[in-house]
Amino acid sequence: MEEYKPGLTPLEYKVIVYPYPVEEVFEDSVIVKATVTEKTDRMNQTRGVLVDFTDMAFGDWKCELPERGQEIEFSKLSGQFFEGLDGKEYKLMNDQDLVGFFKGE
């Protein structure tokens, strides 16, 4: 599993997510986007990894809960970006912005 070091401690019902980088595929080649539309594309990204959350997060949920390190799906345009201690870009968002998670095989 990839190591994440956001350096930020979430409060209340917040979670920290590592959103996957936005990529474009051109004839079997993957290129990480670095264009003017990159910011919009990053905000529209809806898949990533759940990195951290508080003890209060998911407290009122009545379903199976995601775990740290699990691949998740989250609401478009949710949360705010910040740069972690490791130089990666993370999103801080409310627990209710998560819409689902993927189970391993």
Image: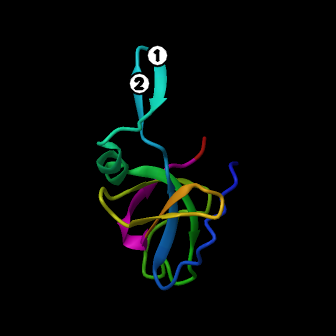
Give the residue drawn at x 54%, y 49%.
103
* Element under disc 2: strand
* Mark 1 residue type: Asp
How busy is the neighbourhood of tag 2: few (under 14 within 10 Å), some, or many (20 plus)? few
- The answer to the question of whether label 2 and label 1 lie on touching residues, with beta carbons closer than 8 A, is yes
Q: Which residue is mark 2?
A: 25
Compared across the picture, whether 84 is left or right of 90 comes to right
| Dot 1: element | loop
Q: Position of residue 90 (x, y in %)?
A: 51, 60
The stretch of residues the image draws in magenta is 93-103
Query: Is residue 96 covered in magenta?
Result: yes
Numbered circle sitting on residue 101:
none
Residue, disc 1: 28
Q: Is residue 46 above or below residue 34?
A: below
The amino acid beneath tag 2 is Val
Task: Write the residue at 35% across / 38% down.
Answer: 35
Q: Position of residue 62 (x, y in %)?
A: 43, 74
In which quadrant will I find the C terminus? top right
The quadrant in which residue 95 appears is bottom left
